[in-house]
Amino acid sequence: MVTSKTQAYLYKWTHISSGMWYVGCRTAKGCHPKDGYLCSSTLVKPLLLESMSDWEREILCISDPNYILQLETLYLHAVDAKNDPLSFNQHNGDGKFILRSHSQSTK
């Protein structure tokens, strides 16, 4: 399915066997949930590319880009993603990053 209308979305990737997860959003012009986008995370993207069958993607919300950007921050804050040991997210949408390694947690 190809569309020129932007359908910004909030998504969640979950590593099936470990339960670890990553939440992100896609707001680029012309984007839509079936555009093939994976994520921007330098931690998660290589893991997805290594073995897509080990992961499940959920679309949490589709809306206009401004709302989706706000929703991502609200969601990450609500679940305190940067402090959840099962989260790959290193911030809560607030620009305050933490550094931790998940390299062995999905093996």
Image (cartoon, rainbow, N blue to C red):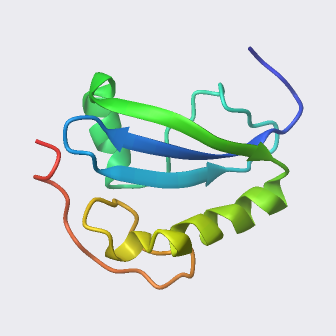
Q: What residue appears at the point 43 percent right and 42 percent down from the top-left corner?
A: 13
Vertical arrangement, residue 93 with respect to residue 2, above or below: below
Q: Residue at x 23, y 72 (%)?
A: 100
**Image x and y of residue 70, in percent:** 73, 68
Q: Is residue 3 left or right of residue 79?
A: right
Q: Residue at x 57, y 45 (%)?
A: 11
Q: Residue reaching furthest bottom? A: 96
Looking at this rendering, what residue extends furthest in the front direction?
Answer: 78
Considering the image in quadrants, where does the C terminus appear?
A: top left
Furthest residue to the right?
5
How far from the left and from the top, in percent, is residue 34? 65, 25
Is 24 above or below relative to 45? below
Is residue 48 rendered to the left or right of residue 61? left
x and y percentages locating residue 16 in the rendered image: 27, 35
Image location (x, y in percent) of residue 104: 10, 52
The N terminus appears in which quarter of the rendering? top right
Q: Residue at x 28, y 59 (%)?
A: 86
Q: How many marks?
A: 0
In the displayed structure image, the side of residue 7 where residue 50 appears, left or right: left
